[in-house]
Image (cartoon, rainbow, N blue to C red):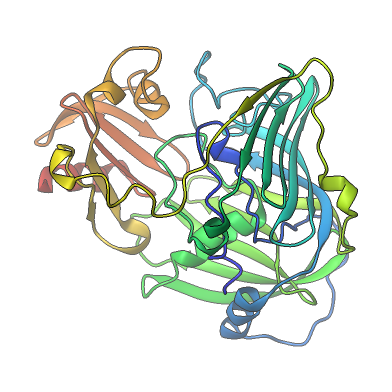
Amino acid sequence: MSLFTERPALRWAAPVGAAALVAAVALVAGRSASAVPSLPPRTPAQLLADVQQARPAGLSGTVVQTSKLGLPELPGVNGFGGGSSSSLSSTVTGTHTWRLWYAGPTRSRLALVGSLGESDVIRNGRDLWVWSSTDKSATHALVPDEVKHASAAPPALEPDNLPKTPQDAARLALAAVDPTTSVTTSGATSVAGRSAYDLLLRPKDADSLVSQVRISVDAQEHIPLRVQVYSTKAANPAFEVGFTAVSFAKPEASQFAFNPPPGTTVKQATLPTPGAGVATKAPQHSTSPRPTVVGRGWASVVVTKLPTQATSRSASSGQLARLLRTLPTVSGSWGRGHLLNGTLFSAVLTDDGRLAIGAVTPQRLYAALAAK
């Protein structure tokens, strides 16, 4: 199975869902200023095949994630915290440091390290733990046997749902490779002291806010060492995730054993079995229209009608809806709403509850809304 499709469905609620472990994905990346190595040439097709077939037995290291998405500060909303935060939902802006360990599909650990504490997501066999040292809380669940065969679910439309590892970021980028994408290479580079190839993805549509995605692929292990996403609005990456240090030695089993420290409040949770509940939920009871995709490739726009509770002004309403209501008002033949004009994506929430979002210019969003 491909390295980028073999991902357990460990998401059960934000912020836990935003940082669910990729239990069947090797987590590795890195960035450094080492000298450029000399490597034999590889074609884009060869690099894509290398990445899809990579299956490292184990690794550990330190990941640095940097997000410059052009989002406004919004105190009180999860996901809009400073770089010192150790909350799993704080990584939508700024720079954050992760520690990770991987020893196969059923043993993995991801830790977000902040100046005031640490949050961990740990899988050890069927046991899944989410732990926060800041509020001394832990959530435990048993991973269903079927979860290892489940494909990844599409990400929710929430601003804190960003890739936490180079593998997550690369999987999303490679899924966008189609006739609207130019795929090339740019020679060799060095990442965390390891030789790597740079694979470049460039959207062909001028309305895309993404200018290029640069994926550094390990020359020996064939897995992404770093992913950089560039915006048409800036010279530096708008989003980057990569390791500053990495080891391919398989971590000891003790690294994945977790016992809640004294004084920890422990909650039990139940993870849904993949496909469970689909047959029992009668489609006729659903009144929400399905999202519509306007356009294709990098310039596609998703248009959907949000539930009333998601667009309400209550504290429990959706983060994206609350964020958009603080932004400038725009209007046109499609109606009136609020615009988020970020570095890598734009979004419009209309007064009648429609949401249009995509990695495109605002003009493409307006056209998609007018077409509905």
Measured from the top left, where is residue 31 in percent x and y? 79, 55
Residue in the foreground of this view, choosing between 291 and 272: 272
- Residue at the image position 75 percent from the left and 58 percent from the top: 28
Residue in the foreground of this view, choosing between 352 and 274: 274
Q: How many marks?
A: 0
Q: Is 290 drawn above or below residue 295 in the view shown?
A: above
Measured from the top left, where is residue 240 in percent x and y? 64, 48
- Residue at the image position 50 percent from the left and 38 percent from the top: 12
Residue 296 vs residue 29: left or right?
left
Measured from the top left, where is residue 70 in percent x and y? 50, 33
- Residue at the image position 46 percent from the left and 65 percent from the top: 175
| Furthest residue in direction left, as rendered | 333
Q: Is 354 drawn above or below residue 108 in the view shown?
A: above
Q: Is 81 drawn above or below residue 75 in the view shown?
A: below
Q: Is 372 drawn above or below residue 318 in the view shown?
A: below
Residue 1 vs residue 154: left or right?
right
- Whether residue 97 appears in this view of the structure is yes
Residue 115 vs residue 242: left or right?
right
- Whether residue 212 appears in this view of the structure is no
Residue 173 vs residue 187: left or right?
left
Q: Quadrant of the N terminus?
A: bottom right
Dividing the picture into quadrants, the one containing residue 121 is top right
Dividing the picture into quadrants, the one containing residue 316 is top left
Dividing the picture into quadrants, the one containing residue 93 is top right
- Residue at the image position 37 percent from the left and 18 percent from the top: 326
Measured from the top left, where is residue 131 in percent x and y? 71, 30
